[in-house]
Image (cartoon, grey):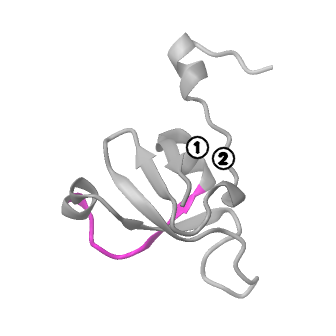
Amino acid sequence: MKHLQTFESFLNEANYKPADFPAGSIVHFKDGEEWIVVEPGMRASNARRQSNEVTLMPHNKLAKDKNVSMSSDFTMDYLNREATKIEKA
């Protein structure tokens, strides 16, 4: 069993899978950025993106101002650590 330091870390611990990110959903991050899901994980084995990644594109003004306005691939490790909510499309 994993030892958690604080109650907040327990509340913020996520265990997302690529299937939790359907295309068109909006992903909210801790820093206030919102990104829209372009493609969920599980591309073909010869594709550039790994099966544990999700392709997202900046959605709100904050995300567009802080990043290049093009899609990026995010790993499940990063999403589990930084995402706070997924608004399903």
Look at 62% across and 53% down and name the residue there: 76
Look at 39% across and 38% down and name the residue there: 30
Task: Tell me, for residue 59, which label it has, or none.
Answer: none
Outermost residue on the right side: it is 1
Is residue 60 toward the left or the right of residue 28 in the image?
Answer: left
Q: Is residue 13 above or below residue 5?
A: below
Q: Residue beneath label 2, please? A: 16
Residue 6 showing in the rendered view: no
Residue 65 showing in the rendered view: yes
Residue 23 falls within the magenta-colored stretch: no
Task: Indicate the amino acid at tag 1.
Answer: Asn
First in residue order: circle 2 vs circle 1? 2
Query: Tag 2, which secondary structure?
Result: loop
Task: Tell me, for residue 80, which label it has, or none.
Answer: 1
Residue 73 lies, in percent from the top left, at: 51, 68
Q: Is residue 18 above or below residue 51?
A: above
Query: Disc 2, disc 1: CB below 8 Å?
Result: yes
Look at 41% across and 74% down and name the residue there: 71
Quarter where residue 69 is shown: bottom left
Query: Tag 1, which secondary structure?
Result: helix
Q: Quadrant of the N terminus?
A: top right
Q: How many labels, in total?
A: 2
Q: Which segment is the magenta one?
A: 66-75
Viewer-side residue, 50 vs 60 = 60
Residue 68 falls within the magenta-colored stretch: yes
Outermost residue on the top side: it is 6
Quarter where residue 88 is shown: bottom right
Disc 2 crowd rating (10 Å Cα; few below 14, some 14-19, many 20+) is some
